[in-house]
Amino acid sequence: MDLAKKILGQKTFDQFMKMTFYGQFVAGEDHNDIKPLIQKNHSYGVGSVLDYSVEEDISQEEAERKEMDSCVSAAEKENIGKDHRERKYQAHKQFSDRRGGVTGARTYFYADEAKCDQHMETFIKCIKASGGSSMDGFSAIKMTALGRPQFLLQFSEVLVKWRRFFTFLASQQGKDGLEALEQRLELTQLQEFMTKLGANGDFYGWFKGRKEDSTGCIDMLDWNSLIDDRTKISDLLVVPNVELGKLEPLLGKFTVEEDQQMKRMLQRVDVLAKHALESGVRLMVDAEQTYFQPAISRLTLEMQRTYNGEKPVIFNTYQCYLKEAYDNVTMDVELSRREGWHFAAKLVRGAYMYQERERAKEIGYEDPINPDYESTNRMYHRCLDYVLDEIALNRKANVMVASHNEDTVKHTLTRMNELGLIPTENKVYFGQLLGMCDQISFPLGQAGFPVYKYVPYGPVNEVMPYLSRRAQENRGFMKGAQKERELLWKELKRRLASGELLYKPVY
C-alpha cells in the first residue's frame, strides 16, 4: 500500500481510492463531505448511523505492548497470581493485538487519558454531525476508546462471577435447567445452605428491606442489584467469598490513579450520552470481545436507566452468536419493564467469532460462541421474536435488526405484520452497511420502514486500516453485486410495466 502511494502520489492515491473501494464503503472525509450522501439516502427513506472509522495504523508489536500495559493493574504486577482472577479476564500477549481475525470492527488501543479525551471529542463531533444531517440519526461509539481497558476486564469478571454464583446457588435449590429469569432463590434456604457450608454471614440480611413487598425470594436482577449502591468505583470490583460469607475485593488494592481512570471512563460515557440527548441523536454502543462485553453492557444499561426514561436514546448491542445472548436480552428487557424505561437494542450476529474461538481454545475456557451458523440464526430469531413480542405488549421497547440476511429481514416483516406493528411507529428499525445490500435497504426505505445505513467516514489515509479489513470481509462482494444487478434489473422491468419508472420521494 505504501509503495502504491509513492508511485501515484498522495493526492492521486486518495482520488483513486475515492473512485473505487473508499467511495464504495466510506461516505466522505468529514461531516461536511458526507452531507450530500446522507441527504440523498434520506430522500429515499434511508437514514444514517454515523461511524467515524479512523483508527491508528500501528504495528502488531506496538499493539501488543499497548494492550499488555493497559490491561494489567499495579496490584497484579506486584502480586502475580495472588488475586482472585480468571485467565479469561486477563491480558494474554498471544491475543493482545485485538485486530487479529476481526474484519468489520474498529479497534482502539489505550495510550493515555489524553488520547481517550481526544476520542471523546471525536465522538462528540460525530454526534453533532449526525444531529446536523438529519432529525432521526444514530451515532456509534466504542467503549474501549473511552478508557483504560483494565477496568472493563475486571468489571466483566466481577459481573460474570456474580452471575455464576447465583446460578450455583439456584442449582442447590433444584432450579437447574431453567431460563435465567425463571430461577429464584428462596432466601431462608439460601441462609441455611450457606451456614451449612460453614459461612458465617447474614445472607438474608443482604436483601432484607431492598424490596417493599418482599416475597422471601430473589431473582437474578435482585441479585445483581447488590452492587448498584456502591459509590466508590473500585468498590464495584468485589466478589462473594462463600467461606467467609462476605464480599471481598477482586484485587488486593487499587491505586488512586486507577480509581480515577475508572471514574473518568464513566464520565466520558456520560458526557456523550448528554450530547446525544441534546442533539436529538440516538447513541449506539457497539459490542466488543466477550472478556470486555459484560462490563460494556452493564455500563450501557446504566446509561439507559438514566437517559431512556422518556424516549430511546441509548441503544445496547447484543451479539447473537453468543450462547448467552437470549439470557442477556430477556434480563435487560425485564429490568426495563420493572423500572419503566425504554429498552433499546441493536441485534447483530457478531464480528469476533474466529478470534473468540481461538482464544477460548488456547487459554482453556468454554467457547462462548454458538456451535454453527444455523444455531446462531435460531438465536438471532429467538432474541428478535422476544423483543418484537415485548414491543407489541409494551410500546417502550425498540429494536434495530442489523442484518444483511434476507431471511431475517423477511422474518421480521412477517412478525411485524402478525403483531400489528406499524412501520411509522418507529419501534423496529433495519440496519445495513453502506455499500452493501442496497437491494434490501432502499426497497424497505421506500416502503416506509425505518431503515439505516451504517455510514463510516474519515480521511482516506486514516480509514485505510478499517477499509483493508472490510476488503477481507467482503471477498464475496462481486457475487453479491451480481445478485444486486439481477434484482435491480427485475425491479426496473416491474416499474416499466407499471409506469412507476421514477421514484418521487415524499418530503
Image (tube, helix red, strand yellow):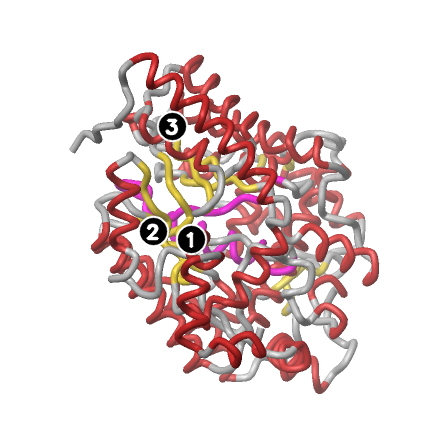
- The reply to whether the C-beta atoms of the residues labelled 1 and 2 are less than 8 Å apart is yes
In the rendering, which numbered label is found on residue 306?
A: 2
Residue drawn at (55%, 57%), measured in percent from left and top? Answer: 105
- For marks 1 and 3, give the one nearer the viewer: 3
SS assignment at label 3:
helix
Q: Disc 2 on helix, strand or loop?
A: helix
Mark 1 → mark 2, Cα distance in angstroms? 6 Å
Q: Amino acid at mark 1?
A: Glu
Q: Nearer the viewer, residue 155 or 380?
A: 380
Q: Is residue 129 above or below residue 506?
A: below
Mark 3 residue type = Pro
Residue 135 sits in quarter: top left
- Residue 295 is one of the magenta-drawn residues: yes
Q: Is residue 389 above or below residue 362?
A: above
Number of residues whose C-alpha sits closer than 10 Å to that of mark 2, classed few (under 14), some (14–19) or many (20 or more):
some
Q: Quadrant of residue 241?
A: bottom right
Please give the residue where the numbered disc 3 appears in the rendered image. Answer: 443
Quadrant location of the C terminus in the rendered image? top left
Residue at point 26%, 27% (across, down)? 503
Which residue corresponds to mark 1? 302
Residue drawn 66% across the image and 56% down it: 201
Residue found 51% across the figure and 67% down from its top: 464
Label 2 vs 3, first from the N-terminus:
2
Location of residue 72 in the rendering, given as x and y in whole percent from the top left corner: 65, 78
Q: What is the C-alpha distance between the residues marked 2 and 3?
A: 36 Å
**Mark 3 crowd level (few <14, some 14–19, many ≥20, 10 Å Cα):** some
Q: Which residues are magenta?
A: 291-320
Which tag, 1 or 3, sits closer to the chain's start? 1
